[in-house]
Amino acid sequence: MPVKLEPNIRASALLEKEDVFVMDSTRAESQDIRPLRVAILNLMPQKEVTEKQLLRLLANTPLQIEAVFLRTGTYEAKHADTHYLTSFYKTLQEVVKRKEKFDALIITGAPVEQMDFCEVTYWDEFTKILDWAEQNVYSSMYICWAAQAALFYHYGIKKEQLKDKIFGLFTHTVKEKKSPLVRGFDETFIAPHSRHTEVNLKEVEKHKDLDILATADGAGLHLAASKDLRRVFVFGHGEYDIDSLHSEYTRDKQKGLKIELPKNYYVDNIEGNLPPLNWRSHQQLLFLNWLNYCVYQKTPFNIRDI
């Protein structure tokens, strides 16, 4: 089944070129089915790139998805088209005013990880979104910085600054095979990471409400979830394209920042020699498992009952 999108959202045309199944709202409404409403708070600088990466994963499931993009109202993105954002993205204030509810919420990473949480311009708004989600969203997935921020806000788990950036492709081991989130996973799998901070595994283990699902030597925690599966924390970037790490490396190198080659990424460790795309299937399976077992099988049929 496809992702349902508003007409003219830019990622739609890009996905259609990749033969990814999307449909506009007019066609979707003609089908006798209630789509899952998935809100996406997109905090990444390159909005359209992140749109495409996430919608690609959401589109490849047997469920019809209605994707609604959210933005911060208290902070204006510096690298985005303001007219585009106001046309296709909603603020928390707008969804609250309309009393909207969602089966699922995805919050992306953000380029603010080296700042203290309280120093982030939109931190107060971010915490309001987390509070709103507790009553108006069935299950939430937090990615990278958002995962660290949500762990801090809900459980008091602090992030730790790293001496060297975790950057590259890492092999992960499934730690809790009975979790439906990793159902069908191989015992080991690959995922990209790109961050300057981490959370301590021992601190996560102290919380009886949290399960550690996958970790990697050299990258630490990759996947965790609350026992009721209504909060899912993803610390890597399985949604990344084949050249995403290369683009980040090139960007930081051009800025004169201290940056090492991404680990286990370039073939023969030669800069620019891109690897095969060998992490998408597990990321796709993670999204499929989350939407099926944590959302579709659990969320009320009447969305007003969330």
Image (cartoon, rainbow, N blue to C red):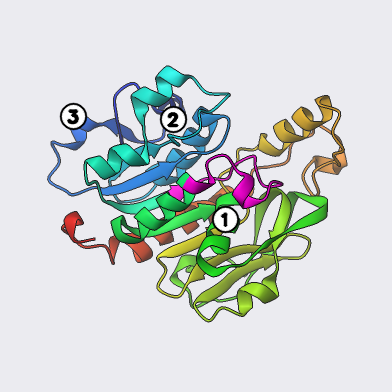
**Label 2 sits on what residue type?**
Leu
For discs 1 and 2, the disc positioned in front in the rendered view: 1
Task: Classify 10 Å Cα crowding around label 1: few (below 14), some (14-19), many (20 and above).
Answer: many
Mark 3 or 1, nearer chain start = 3
**Frontmost residue, 18 versus 237:** 237
Quadrant occupied by the N terminus: top left
Q: Nearer the viewer, residue 38 or 19?
A: 38
Q: Main secondary structure of the magenta part?
A: loop
Answer left or right for 240 relative to 304.
right
Disc with the residue nearer the chain's start (1 vs 2): 2
Q: Magenta stretch?
A: 106-124
**For the residues carrying marks 3 and 2, which lies nearer the camera in this image?**
3
Residue hosting label 3:
26
Q: Position of residue 208 (x, y in %)?
A: 53, 81
- Residue 235: x and y in percent read 61, 56
Mark 3–mark 1 Cα distance, whole angstroms, equals: 37 Å
**Residue 149 numbered mark, or none:** 1
124 versus 304 height, above or below: above
- 302 drawn magenta: no
Reading the chain from its start, which is encountered first: label 3 or label 2? 2
Left or right: residue 168 compared with residue 1: right
As shown in the figure, which amino acid type bears the numbered disc 3? Thr
Residue 301 location (% of width, % of height): 18, 60
C-alpha separation, residue under disc 1 versus residue under disc 2: 30 Å
Q: Amino acid at mark 1?
A: Ala
Magenta span has 112? Answer: yes
Mark 2 — residue?
15
Query: How crowded is the residue under tag 2: few (<14 C-alpha within 10 Å), some, or many (20+)?
Result: some
- Residue found 16% across the figure and 48% down from its top: 33
* Res. 291 in view: no
